[in-house]
Amino acid sequence: MSIWSYCIVPFAWIMQQCMKLLNNYALALIAYSLITKLIILPFSMKQQKNSLGMVRLKPYQDALAKKYGNNRERYSMELQKLYQREGYNPMSSCLPMLLQFPLILLIYAIVRHPITYVYYGELFTANTEQRVLDLANTIGFNNFPEKLASVFEKIASGETPLKTISNYELQIYDKAQDLVHIPGDKLFGLIDLSGTPSQQFWSWMLLIPIIAGLTSLLLAVLSQKMSPLQQSADPSTQGSSKMMNYMMPIMSLIFCYTLNCALGWYWIISNVIGIAQLFLLNKIYDPKKVLAEVNEKIEREKSEKKQKRSAAAAKKAAALAASQKKKK
């Protein structure tokens, strides 16, 4: 058993429990999205906190860049001193993001292959054997049960049936669809969650990649607008990152068009939950509040430096006046 298999077991179990509780695949995917988002939430919170830490240091970093801009070695040295003094680790902002990737891959694998990870041991019900024999007698295929079993094995392998089984086996697959029916796999009674939009010239399934792309675009735009780092960035530098807003929506559109609708439905729900999470995190860790605190601190430090310079100048003037008085 591979490491991947061990890692995927708890997530497959979560999906199984969602199906047992709701007995509806579309609703189970919503519940599964909520649970997996909660699992990833601590990493998202850590990433938000690290971004706020960078916001606090940005004015000082800009001052160092202005002072040592022509001396990269000195600038790097002073920047490291700044990080050490403030207790900030720049690599800590990357770790939560890196840890999320394998989790997301595990989650998507289960959504994409429900028969493999959720239903493999439950494909055949108590009366399936007799139903298989009855179906074999009806359509007249030789060795039908054995052929049907081989078809199920290929489906459970996670491969696309239309690309991997022969025309002869495809007839068996079409005749035996009722034996592997997943409750609630018709979204709103119109969209087959096991189907793939790219295999249909026109169907309601095409709505899935379109909505997935639009919700992904909305999430990307809001993420950039509400990002602590973007709020503290100069307007001239914000334009370069706007192109990234369109990369994820385009990828969402392509993936959800070429893969099964269940993944697209999960993607849509995940985007909607992600938007809600974005507002929640910005409420808990408010970038505007942090920026106001940073600006207030900078103004206070400037005022203190000005007072020190004034006090030093007054002291120097008093010393000079006293010296001149002694000479007289």
Image (cartoon, rainbow, N blue to C red):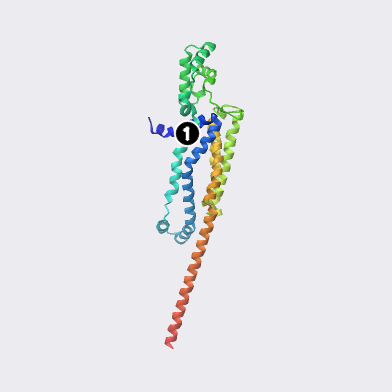
Task: Report the residue at 47% width, 60% height from top.
Answer: 63
| Residue 41 in view here | yes
Q: Looking at the picture, how far across and down is residue 185, in whole percent? A: 56, 28
How many C-alpha atoms fall within 10 Å of the one at disc 1: few (<14), some, or many (≥20)? some
Q: In this figure, what is the number of numbered marks?
A: 1
Residue farthest to the left? 1
Task: Report the residue at 56% width, 54% height from top.
Answer: 235
Q: Looking at the picture, how far across and down is residue 12, in whole percent? A: 46, 32
Residue 128 versus residue 314 in the image, above or below: above
Quadrant of the rendering where the N terminus is positioned: top left
Q: Is residue 76 left or right of residue 33?
A: left
Q: Amino acid type of disc 1?
A: Ile
Quadrant of the rendering where the C terminus is positioned: bottom left
Q: Is residue 84 left or right of residue 254?
A: left
Residue 17 versus residue 75 in the image, above or below: above
Residue 245 versus residue 68 in the image, above or below: above
Task: Report the residue at 41% width, 31% height from top.
Answer: 5
Q: Say which quarter of the image contains residue 219.
A: top right
**Secondary structure at numbered mark 1:** helix
Q: Looking at the picture, how far across and down is residue 229, in whole percent? A: 51, 51
Q: Looking at the picture, how far across and down is residue 221, in whole percent? A: 57, 45
Residue nearer the viewer, 142 or 258? 142
Look at mark 1 in the image and give the residue it sits on.
14
| Residue 233 in view here | no
Residue nearer the viewer, 264 or 133? 133
